[in-house]
Image (tube, rainbow, N blue to C red):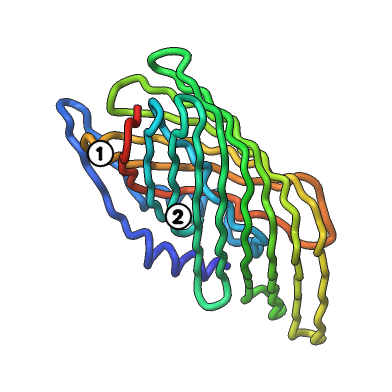
Amino acid sequence: MVKDWRRFISGSLQPLHWRVAPGRMWVRVSCFAVATAALVSGLGGCAPALMPHSANVPVLGAKGAAELRGSTGLNGTEVQGAWAATNHLALTAGGLRYASGRDTRFRSAEVGLGYYAWPGNEVMLAVYAGAGYGSGRAATSGFEGGRETDIRSRYLRPYIQPTLVWQPTERWHLGLAWQVNQVHYLRLLETTRTSAPTPFTVERNGAGLWQTQHQVMLTSSYWLSARWRLVVRVGGAQAGGQSGVAAEPWPLVANLGLTVRLGNAR
């Protein structure tokens, strides 16, 4: 997994920088800093059974408001959207794809429905509920003793997500989301092989497992123009409880993206 991270960071997260100067404000975003944070957090120790989506935190105004976002980062490439069906009800959807090397791949999609309101000019409160479906495979190798671990999973992921958005200026938003997932693993197979000193293979089957997973995400976005918004998101995912099978989500969610306004966004 460590080797996969080095390859991923060197290939996908080069030290690219963006600078925007609206008046006296300068915004500088460094992908390299996000990648470094991932390594410092101690990633690369195990193969994940689930690749989490970034919490969808739209900034919507009146009925008909819509936005579409594309992002890429440590948890893969994502496309997310949101549409205000009324002045307070919103529909959300998203898709994710992650690939690292030949043996680690995840694909998933989700849909949701939420209620949002602006109790003041600077604060938006929202609660979203939805469900996701995904599958994937993750493999690790190169451990002492020649041990290799392979995890294959397929899962349903109903969730609820309280959200807070703060808008101190017309151009800048800061969002905080807490997503609680109740993951049901339809398939969860962990295979461990060791070549030395004595070769052996161990398989653990966790199909049918239910597991609560929490994700906290901080979102910062800045309007580049009347339609385009630069978005940076950083958060973490953690599973609750223990099981006999490795059923951990990818622990760090961090990415950079662009959002386009399609309707009456705030």
Q: Which residue is mark 2?
A: 78
Task: Please determine whether, in this image, residue 264 is positioned above or below residue 94.
Answer: above
Q: Callout 2: 10 Å neighbours few (<14), some, many (20+)?
A: many
Q: Nearer the viewer, residue 58 or 211?
A: 58
| Horizontal side, residue 162 vs residue 200: left or right | left
Viewer can see residue 178: no
Q: Nearer the viewer, residue 182 or 255?
A: 182
Q: Which residue is mark 1?
A: 227
Tell me which corner region of the image, top left, top right, bottom left or bottom right, holds residue 214: top right
Q: Quadrant of the C terminus?
A: top left
Asked which secondary structure carries label 1, the reply is loop
Q: Residue 103's x, y, as percent?
A: 57, 76
Q: Quadrant of the N terminus?
A: bottom right
Tell me which corner region of the image, top left, top right, bottom left or bottom right, holds residue 155: bottom right
| Horizontal side, residue 219 vs residue 111: left or right | left
| Horizontal side, residue 181 vs residue 227: left or right | right
Q: Residue 89's x, y, as percent?
A: 51, 30
Tell me which corner region of the image, top left, top right, bottom left or bottom right, holds residue 243: bottom right
Q: Callout 1: 10 Å neighbours few (<14), some, many (20+)?
A: few
Q: Earlier in the sequence, mark 1 or mark 2?
A: 2
Which residue sits at x=41%, y=55%? 72
Task: Please determine whether, in this image, residue 32 is positioned above or below residue 5.
Answer: above
Asked which secondary structure carries label 2, the reply is strand
Which residue sits at x=38%, y=63%? 12
Residue type at mark 1: give it: Arg
Q: Residue 77's x, y, as percent?
A: 44, 58
Q: Give the mark count.
A: 2
Which residue sits at x=26%, y=41%? 228
